[in-house]
Amino acid sequence: MIHQPKKGNILSVPDVKQEKYLVWHIEGGLGKNIAATALCQSIKQYYPDRKLIMVVSHPEVFLNNPYIDRVYFVGNKSYFYDDYIHEKDTLIFKQEPYNQTDHILKRKHLIHNWCDILGIEYKGQQPQVYVNMAQKMTTGLWKRNKPVMVIQTNGGPLNQQKYNYSWSRDIPFDVAQEIVNNYKKDYHIFQVTRPDSQKLDGVEVIDKPLANMELFALLVEAKKRLLIDSCLQHAAASFKLPSTVLWIGTSPTVFGYDLHDNIIANPPQGKVKLIDSYMFDYNLDGILHECPYIDHNEMFNLDNIYNSINK
C-alpha cells in the first residue's frame, strides 16, 4: 500500500540562494601584487554580497587577508570554471591597469587606476599585507650585532633578465658602494639584489629566493631603508615603514607613496631620443641605447640621499 502524505504535511524544499562572486585576476611582479592589497577591503565594502576570489601571480601576500574568500595562483585553477564561471553570478575583473589612459599619461597612481576599473571610489588606499603570528617571528632571522640597514640595489625577477644592471630602475653600483662605505661602520648592511648583479663590498648579500614574509621581516628589523621602485618599497608602505626611495625611469606619482621620501633622478641633459618608445618612455629592463645619462654622477646628488637616510 502506498501512503499518501496528509494535506498540509508535504515537505517543501527550501530555495538555495546562489552564491555571488567577484573574481579579480592580477598578473605581474610582487610589487604590483602588494599594491593590489590596498583595495581588498574596499571591494568587500562596495560588493558586500559577493565572495572575493583572487587569482594572482604572488598568492602569499593575500593569504592572511580577512577580506578575501579564496586565493588561486594564476597557473593553478583546477575546476575554476565549474566553481565560479559556468552558470554562476560572477563579476570578473581581468583588465590590465597599465593599459589605462591615466596610467600611460602618468596622471593617476596604479591603485587609483584599479579603482576606476573596479568601479570603486579612490580614497588614497594604501597596501595592506597581513602577517600571522609565526610570520612575525621571522624578524629574528635578521638580527645582527649592529643596527640593520637594508639597501635594495637591483629589482625585478631574480632570473631571466637580459642585463645584470637595469639603468632605469637599479642603483648605479658606484653610487651604492659610496653609500655603503658611509654607513658600514655603524650599521650591518644587507644588499637585496639579483644573483647575476654586482655585489657590494662590506654588506651581507641577499640574492636567493625567500618567502615573501621572510623578506618583508627584513624591512621591519631595519633601522634604515634605501630602496628602489621594486617590491620592497610597496611592502614598506604596507607596514608603514618610511623609507628613502630612488626613482630613475619610473615615477612616484604612478607607483610611489607619500609615506616615503621619494628622490627622483635629475632630468637627463641634452635631447633624449626615444626611438623605440611606444606607450611608455623607458623600459624597466634598462635597454642600453635608451639610457639618457653619460655618467652615473648625473643621476643623483649624494647629499640629498644622505639627508634623507639620516632623517
Image (cartoon, grey):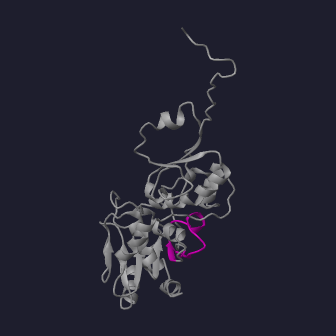
Q: Residue at x 61, y 27 (%)?
A: 13
The percent position of residue 58, horizontal first and vertical second, equals 44, 55
The percent position of residue 306, horizontal first and vertical second, equals 49, 86
Point out the residue furthest to the bottom here: 185
* Quadrant in the picture for the C terminus: bottom right
The percent position of residue 169, horizontal first and vertical second, equals 45, 67
Against 104, residue 78 (above or below) is above
Magenta residue span: 243-266
Point out the residue furthest to the front here: 1
Does the magenta portion include 251? yes
Front residue of 14/26: it is 14
How many numbered discs sit on the rendered protein?
A: 0
Front residue of 143/154: it is 143
- State which quadrant residue 17 falls in: top right
Q: Is residue 212 visible?
A: yes
Against 309, residue 220 (above or below) is above
Q: Residue at x 64, y 21 (%)?
A: 10
* Quadrant in the picture for the N terminus: top right
Q: Is residue 105 visible?
A: no
Q: Is residue 35 left or right of residue 102?
A: left
Does the magenta portion include 20? no
Front residue of 238/279: it is 238
